[in-house]
Image (cartoon, grey):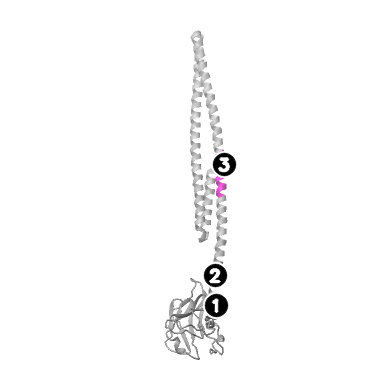
Amino acid sequence: MFVVYLLLVLGGQSEATSDVAEGSPPDSHDTCHTLKLAAQQIRREGYTAIDKADSIREQAYRLKDEAYEVRESAMEAKSALETTLVETIALVRSQSTVTNLYIQEMRSTLSEIKKKMEDMEEKMEDMEERMEEQDKKEEDRFAALDEHSKTVERKISEHAAVSSTISSHVSETLSTALTLKERQKAQMSEVRIISLYKIAEQINTHPGGTFDADLAVDGMVTFDYPYWTDMAAYTHTTSSPGSKLWIELGGLFRIYKIKVWNLRHCCQEQLIGAHIYADDRLVGTVIRAQGTYDFTIGDEDPVYAKEVTLQQPLGQQLHILELQIWGTGPFLEDDKFD
C-alpha cells in the first residue's frame, strides 16, 4: 500500500510540475525546463529504488519459504527419528549392547540436527531483523525523496512567480520605452534652426579685420557693412584655393534646409563655385551671384549629418553673412525616424 501511495504522490507531483512549467513565462522557459528534468530524474530514481526494494523483499520471502521447508523437513525427520527411536528401544531390550551404541549415535545425530535447527532459527531471526532494517531504510529514503520532490516543486513555483513578476516588469518597461520613443519622435519632428551659436571654424581668417567664423552662426542678418573693421558681421578668408568654413552641430541631426546669406554691399560673385556639404554628402553648389541661397533636401532621400561645410575650391575669398541650417534631432546612430 505504501508503494502504491508513493506512486500516486509522485505522479501528482509530476502533473503539478508540468502545470507550473506550462504556466511559466517565455523568458524563464529554459530554467523551468531544467528543474522539471531534475524532478523527473528524482522520480525515476524513486521508481528504481522501489523496484530494488521489491526484488530484495521477494528474495527474502523465497529464503524464508525455503527455511520453512527445511524446518518442516527437519520436523518430519525428527518425527521419523522419534518413531525409529521407539522401535529401537523395543529392539534394544533384546539387543542391549548394540542398541546402546546405536542410541548414543542417534542422540549424537539428534543433537547435531537440533544444533543445526537452532543455528537456522538464529539465521532466520537475523534475516528478519535485516529485512526490517532494510524496510526502515527504504521508508526513510522514500520519505527523503518525497521531501526533496516537494522542495523542488516549491522552488519551481517560486521561480515561476519571480519569472512572472520579471516578465510583468519587462512588459511595463517596454511599454514605457515605446511611449518615450513616440514622445521623442514627436518632439524631434519639429524642424528648427539647429546652427545658431554652434561651434564654427574656418581654414584661415583675413587679416584686415575681425572676420571670425563665429559670425556665420550669430543670427545677425540685418546688416553687413562695417563702419569699423573690428565690428564686421560677416566671415572672411584669404583668397587661397580650398577655403572653407564648417559648423559642428554637436550631434547627429536630420538636415531639411541650408540657407547661405551672401554679402549685400559687395563681392557677391566671389561665392560662385562654392560647394555645400552635409558631412561628406554634397547638398548643392552656388552657380550665380545673389543675396541668399536656399538648398532644400526632400523627404525621399533624407540626409543625416553632424557637420555642415561650405567650401570654395576656386582661388577666391570665402565670405558670408550667415549660414543657417534647419533640421530635427539630435539622434543616436540607430535612432533615426525616416
Q: Is residue 207 above or below residue 98?
A: below
Q: Where does the image place residue 125, in percent across and percent down from the top left? A: 55, 30
Q: Which residue is mark 2?
A: 177
Between marks 1 and 2 in the image, the one whose residue lies nearer the viewer: 1
Range covered by the magenta-colored residues:
136-150
Between 216 and 22, the residue placed more toward the observer is 216
**Quadrant hosting residue 275:** bottom left
**First reached walking from the N terminus: tag 1 or tag 3:** 3
* Secondary structure mostly seen in the magenta stretch: helix
Q: CA distance from mark 1 to mark 2?
A: 15 Å
Q: Which residue is mark 1?
A: 187
Tell me the residue at 45%/87% (across/down). Answer: 270
| Crowd around label 1: few <14 · some 14–19 · many ≥20 (10 Å) | few
Q: Is residue 334 above or below residue 155?
A: below
Q: CA distance from mark 1 to mark 3?
A: 69 Å
Q: Where does the image place residue 37, in percent across and percent down from the top left? A: 49, 51
| Crowd around label 2: few <14 · some 14–19 · many ≥20 (10 Å) | few
User: What amino acid does circle 3 point to?
Assistant: Asp
Between marks 2 and 3 in the image, the one whose residue lies nearer the viewer: 2
Circle 1 sits in a helix, a strand or a loop, which is it? helix
User: What amino acid does circle 1 point to?
Assistant: Gln
